[in-house]
Amino acid sequence: MESSAQRGGKLRSWLDGRVGLTDLEKIAAKKQIPVHRHTLWYYLGGMTLFLFMVQVSTGILLLLYYRPSAEEAFESVQFLMGEVQFGWLIRSIHAWAANLMIFTLFVHLFSVMLLKAYRPPREVTWFSGVALMGLAMGFGFTGYLLPWNELAYFATKVGTEITGSVPVVGSFLGRLLRGGNDVTGATLTRFYGIHVAILPATATALLGLHLYLVQRHGMSVPPAVERAGGAGRHMPFMPNFLLRDLVGWLSALAVLAALAAFFPAELGKKADPFLPAPTGIKPEWYFMFMFQTLKYLPAHILGIEGEVFGIVAFGLGGLFLLLIPVLDRRTVRGEPSRLFTWIGVAIIVYMLLFTFLGYTASATK
Amino acid sequence: MAEHAMEPDASRRGFVNWFLGLSGVAFLVSALYPLTRYLVPPPVAESTAGTVTLPIKPDDVKPNSGQIFKFGSRPAILVRTPAGDLRAFSAICTHLNCTVQYRSDLTQIWCACHNGHYDLNGKNVEGPPPRPLDSFVVNVRSNQIVVSKSA
């Protein structure tokens, strides 16, 4: 108590007595980051967190002008882009940071997966991380509709229809999501509520759990490094790792600013339910591998509709991803687990290949 | 000593806990039921219009072309085949609900979302659509196109 009071003066000691700054400092000073050849991957989670904070701040700013109804949404975004000073910048940053966040989240997830950081006792950290990925995709899906333009309208029709073809509960879920039988203004209002309230609240709670667990268990040292004798040295989190983290955040911010300035977010044409779906319609890139797979599926597989087959397959894939810490028995026992490394590589290759096809295969053939 | 004294109370405690638990469940149900009902949107009366007179003149629809029109609250497509027949179908792709369009280069009805193809009878001929498009009856009466649901 005394030493901290001396260092910070009266205000500090007043706060310390009430908030416990010294205890926090002790925790922070104790935190050590293992240094080895895979340390680089430790920065991706922090970068995703930074981009999430950018999303929260720019999202709040967008709320000041956005109007969530079919009659006004498109016009309010048009006004924001055209009339409001730096409105284009805020929206472009929000759109680009969303993409970058999903990207860093994917890289974070797959690096954690390949480095087997999900092994005991970090299973719940993995579960919460996979759930956060689901929420991030939900953010992307609901946010995409909000400008109420043509692309968003049809992407949402397809996306909610996919939910609707889930066996048994599908039609109920589809109606629940759309706020009716079709994609209408009711869907927009609902997506708005989900995007700005339900998802942020859920994500914040899950993120709190995720960060608490990361804090509790410390950084995972990859099994390969452990078998080779463990991390050679450690660096203190404060300030060594934090400052390196900041470099990562600033780099992300620089990339974000450049993308937003040189490739501002587009708005397109206002949604019209009585126009055909535009040629070359595409979802966001992180849904592309699923979208492209659905295109290749024939009308019927094993007697069930192709789309239902695809959706059930992706659902099971997601469940598999979530349950990896439980399924990978060899890693649990501390043995090398080649199979799960190859599964991870296969998933990445599959996603890359189908995303590539989605952007290159002819849309009209 | 105190534990021994607790012995006869254990069943009473169990009962109270059970009762408390039940009240908790009852509370949750009474809170969640209205909440779930609230989240489910009320049904909106479907447009029951079985017949629509189009704001398009028959002569304005060229052979080998098609256009979207409103059939109640849903889009439908009017097609004039290269042979000159007028046909109408629901414009909602049976795959994932996108709105289809007419492709004069293929003389087919086509969905841009997942590359689904239908022939001029509305039959799904290529790509992912699992079923044909719903077809409507087209009548031309005194220079007006009237589309109705098939009986």
Image (tube, coloured by chain):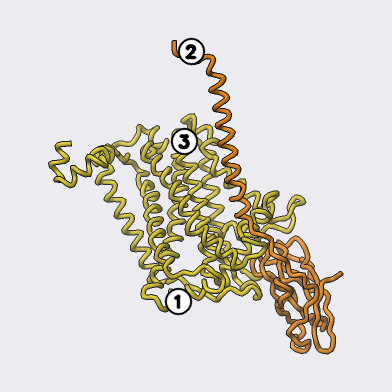
Q: Give above or below for A156 relative to B22.
A: below
Nearest to the observer: residue A227 or residue A110:
A110
Of the numbered discs 3 and 1, the one sitting upstream in the chain is 1
In this rendering, the count of numbered labels is: 3
Residue carrying label 1: A79
Residue carrying label 2: B5
Picture coordinates of residue B106 (x, y %)?
72, 76
Picture coordinates of residue B109 (x, y %)?
73, 73
Q: Are marks 3 and 1 on the same chain?
A: yes
Cα distance in 3D space between marks 3 and 1: 50 Å
Q: Secondary structure at mark 3?
A: loop
Q: Quadrant of residue A36?
A: top left
Of the chain colours in the picture, the one used for chain B is orange
Nearest to the observer: residue A57 or residue B87:
A57
Q: Residue at x 57, y 45 (%)?
A: B31
Q: Quadrant of the N terminus of chain A?
A: top left
Cα distance in 3D space between marks 2 and 3: 47 Å
Give the number of the mark in front: 2 or 3.
2
Q: Residue at x 59, y 50 (%)?
A: B35
- Residue A119's disc number: 3
Say whether residue A235 is visible: no
Q: Looking at numbered disc 2 in the image, what kind of residue is underneath it? A: Ala
Picture coordinates of residue A210 (x, y %)?
42, 43
Mark 2 closeness class: few <14, some 14–19, many ≥20 residues within 10 Å: few
Nearest to the observer: residue A151 or residue A191:
A191
Mark 3 closeness class: few <14, some 14–19, many ≥20 residues within 10 Å: many
Q: Residue at x 75, y 60 (%)?
A: B130
Cα distance in 3D space between marks 2 and 1: 76 Å
Of the chain colours in the picture, the one used for chain A is yellow
Q: Looking at numbered disc 3 in the image, what kind of residue is underneath it? A: Arg
